[in-house]
Amino acid sequence: MYFYIYSDLQLLCVIVTIEKFLLLINFSGSIINYCSFAIVTTLITHHQHMANRFKPDPIEYPNKKRHLLAISLLLSYCLSEPVICVFTQPDLIFLAGGVTFFVALYDYEARTSDDLSFKKGDRFQIINNTEGDWWEARSINTGQKGYIPSNYVAPADSIQAEEWYFGKMGRKDAERLLLAPGNQRGTFLVRESETTKGAYSLSIRDWDEMKGDNVKHYKIRKLDNGGYYITTRAQFDTLQKLVKHYTEHADGLCYRLTTVCPTVKPQTQGLAKDAWEIPRESLRLELKLGQGCFGEVWMGTWNGTTKVAIKTLKPGTMSPEAFLQEAQIMKKLRHDKLVPLYAVVSEEPIYIVTEYMGKGSLLDFLKEGEGKYLKLPQLVDMAAQIADGMAFIERMNYIHRDLRAANILVGDNLVCKIADFGLARLIEDNEYTARQGAKFPIKWTAPEAALYGRFTIKSDVWSFGILLTELVTKGRVPYPGMVNREVLEQVERGYRMPCPQGCPESLHEMMRLCWKKEPDERPTFEYLQSFLEDYFTATEPQYQPGDNL
């Protein structure tokens, strides 16, 4: 086992083999006593030796935990394996490179022989965290070594490891989670504040006669000395103490904190370490979900372990080289309202492997699934989610080019994610590239894009306005009764679809803003997201459900 011990003056590196698991650590005077060991190599006194290998990231631990942490760490590993422990004399313990204690936030089942399976609450030593989304780790519970998804773990004893901490999350997403069926009054979560850096927000599910089920948000402010408070008369050293206090007493809040909001296990970033260009044989196509002009969509399994969606493209649809280049960009577009691209088979026929969304396309969901029975609040919320994802694409200076209900996927609890972003640019089919051919989605396409090929984020905004009509009409084809050529001619003359039956005029006005002739006069997706998220408080507070919407 390797021990690197930081002192104030020098780095002492002692390489030892432990013959027994009995170790006695005494921090007094920076003396460390080892029982039953043989020193293989001693003292390296120059810390430059380690400078390029480790970049220490300080993690605070209370003083009373220092002995326990060190003893636990040293006792937890197999005899023959290396561990690097970095301690400092001040009240900070630097756990660098291979030795940070992390705790599992979720269960995970290994997908390859290189992965580690683990359960929520298991602890790890991180051996290598320099390779992105998959970290090499050793389980303290089992002693086994392998790769783990980095977004499934958090530093032990940190706020990120608390079950009630949801990290970077918007107000609307917090409300979606808390208002999900099954949650009771007092269900809560803590998240980063959207408006104040370094502050947090406490979101609680409440109920009253006027509003029914609703969510209240309280700002948690930080004191100069490091404490936290919602109201100045009740101040706490840590967020944990604040949460504990309000689970015991409402003390001015709308309701006492009763239950932590159930969390949804996140998608891993990729299927596994180094699983990007994968062999076709590793995929099994199991259930055909749909078919389009350029290929099919299947539910399937990767490596016999992982359920995925697989889009198969007909040979000749696009250049494999161009696709692979674009896929590298698509892979880096990560947002919780975008369907993540997991892997590709880059030889024809091209396979695109993504997250599997159980409710299928938004179009089918609205026409034939549960979506037929949704009312306006749910439909507007789905639109807000799509605008959220498109606002991210807007910030990244990317373009979708084919935004419509058929390219939105639906998951549990009406979660919507945008699919197929960027692919339309690569299609080489003549009936598509002519832009007025049978395969081109004329009815969703802005006139400057359909006529002159000028695709921008503003042409995506036009398409979003058309998608809004699909939502409120439960999947009706836009411009009913009109063929593509007629649509192009009429739109150029200034025709715009009338307000759909049951749709509030205020929502139709927003559609018409999306269909402004001049692209620069159309709203941003950031504005559309804000408008839709606040629609029933700022624009339509008197909304009452009707027969259809």
Image (cartoon, rainbow, N blue to C red):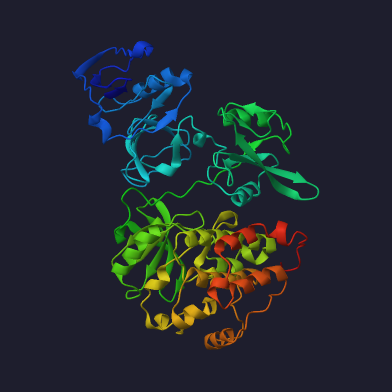
Q: Which residue is rendered at x = 80% and y = 50% of the image?
A: 210
Across and down, in percent, residue 433 comes to: 40, 80
Is residue 348 at all visible to an observer of this figure? Answer: no
- Closer to the camera, 433 or 122? 433
Residue 364 is drawn in which quadrant? Answer: bottom right
- Closer to the camera, 58 or 359? 58
Across and down, in percent, residue 65 comes to: 46, 20
Q: Residue furthest front?
A: 224
Q: Which residue is rendered at x = 68% and y = 68% of the image?
A: 507
Q: Which residue is rendered at x = 37% and y = 70% of the image?
A: 313
- Closer to the camera, 522 or 113? 522
**Can you say which quadrant of the picture contains the N terminus?**
top left
Residue 106 is left or right of residue 549, and the answer is left
Image height check: is 93 above or below 131? above
Image height check: is 384 above or below 367? above
Image height check: is 173 above or below 252? below
Residue 128 is left or right of residue 482, and the answer is left
Across and down, in percent, residue 162 comes to: 53, 34
| Marker count (numbered) | 0
Q: Residue furthest left?
A: 41
**Can you say which quadrant of the picture contains the C terminus?**
bottom right
Image height check: is 520 above or below 541? below
Residue 463 is left or right of residue 251, and the answer is left
Is residue 175 at all visible to an observer of this figure? Answer: yes
Residue 119 is drawn in which quadrant? Answer: top left
Q: Residue furthest right?
A: 209
Across and down, in percent, residue 146 comes to: 32, 39
Residue 19 is left or right of residue 352, and the answer is left
- Closer to the camera, 109 or 466? 466
